[in-house]
Amino acid sequence: METKYNIGNNNGQRNGMHNKNKFQMRIKPTPILFGHKNGLPPSPKRMKMNGKENKGNILNGKPKLSIQDQRKKLPIFDKRNKLVELIQKHKTLIILGETGSGKTTQIPQFIYSAQIHQNGKIGITQPRRVAAISIATRVAAEIGQGMQVGELVGYSVRFHDETSKKTKIKFLTDGMLLREAMFDRLLMEYNVIILDEAHERTIHTDVLFGIVKKAQKVREDRNLPPLKIIIMSATMDVDHFSKYFNNCQAVYIEGRTYPVTMHYTIKPHDDYEAACVATFFKIHKEAPPDHDVLIFLTGQEEIETCANRIRTLSKQPDVMGPPLKVFTLYAAQPHSQQMSVFQPSPVNTRKVIISTNIAETSVTISGIKYVIDSGMVKVRTYHPTTGLEMLKVQKISQEQAWQRTGRAGRDSEGHCYRLYTRSQFELMRKTTVPEIQRANLCTVSLQLLSLGNIERCNI
């Protein structure tokens, strides 16, 4: 369901017409429908969930579950035996799991419990370090009380390795696995490699597709311990990936997302930073304090400016709303600051996180009820004629817009305020341009050369 609203309207009411058309996430075979049953967002002051009123700090009208109960509620948990059977049967497998299915945290644990990895390690790549660290921390907590990161479960990111001889489940950035391949072409340390978030098509992930495929074949030809490859994503062209990996099997897992009502602006806005602040304070004025907000901006400078403006304006006497804690999330932050966004906020205090596209995928921040999408992203581009590389702010793709929208539907019904018009959304690219088509290839070419004759890499 969608509505249109005017950012400049200060009375907190949404202007415009309601459109009864439902929109679908671009996922097959079973689409996710975003919408609200009666066509109107629920009252932010009191919201009924399954016939029960949700007041105060009870999440979704239910008591907070234990970590093991949370695992059992994941859609993927009931499919455990079938997934283990498929992984054992196929040397390469594509797992298309919708947002909230639990694939990232549960698949490595299923493999470990079934001893599919035998004596080797299970390597799981992530495009971003914050995802690798946070997911490793979560998995360690799920495996057992008192389990420390760096023991059975560890992670490896640039400048920080938290693993030991005991580590069997290893989360790492795609860049770190590529670096390891420079010293061990066959990746003999691993018996299972999971390439997660494959749809993001980072330059490192694209190159890794070829490296792990090559390593798998060479190990098979030399009668070495076999290498299983699992490609995971929430949304991608399954046929394209399956064809590359010799028409391998693909499996689909339904997710657990709640309806998200989308709100478009009535007219375009050039100053999306100011629009983010204005939209936030509309939400802050009306919504209950336990409904947190996630704002997407493009980079550190924009994010810090927006955070300071929100902190300053929230202290003005005429601003209504509960106490507020403002967090920022971007790649250049220290690890401790990045991890602070995952901590629950104090009682009756709203949390607002202002983030780059880091928060689009992989990481899950509990309590997010509202998403404010600027519709912009900062990407690295290369100009071959000048030999210059630059960071460019540009419009996101529809694929990214859906990913951002889904952040509001992880715990309960939510709302996504898109700071662009419906027609602007229709004009966006359907999918994101792979990084390998727009980035400088010098570094990755040198890395490939370190593997041997680049013409013989055949990736």
Image (spheres, grey):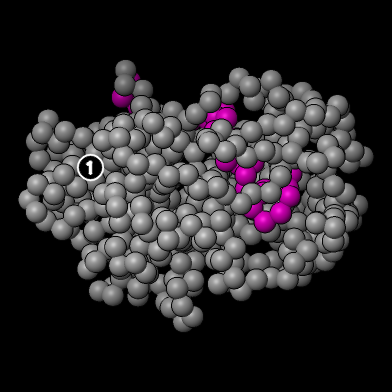
Residue sitting nearer the eye, 16 or 357: 16
Q: Is residue 234 above or below residue 123?
A: above
Tell me which residue sits at (69%, 20%) in the image. 423
Image coordinates for residue 130, horizontal then vertical, percent: 47, 56
Quadrant of image for the N terminus = top right
Tell me which residue sits at (48%, 30%) in the image. 432
Image coordinates for residue 255, horizontal then vertical, percent: 57, 49
Tell me which residue sits at (86%, 61%) in the image. 53
Residue extending farthest bottom: 146
Residue sitting nearer the eye, 55 or 393: 55
Q: Is residue 107 above or below residue 275?
A: below
User: Can residue 409 be found in the magenta stretch?
Assistant: yes
The magenta span reads 386-415
Residue 132 quadrant: bottom left
- Residue located beneath label 1 in the image: 213
Taking 383 as reference, is 142 left or right?
right
Taking 222 as reference, is 33 left or right?
right
Question: How many residues crowd mark 1 within 10 Å: few (<14), some (14–19), many (20+)?
Answer: many
Q: Is residue 249 above or below residue 109?
A: above
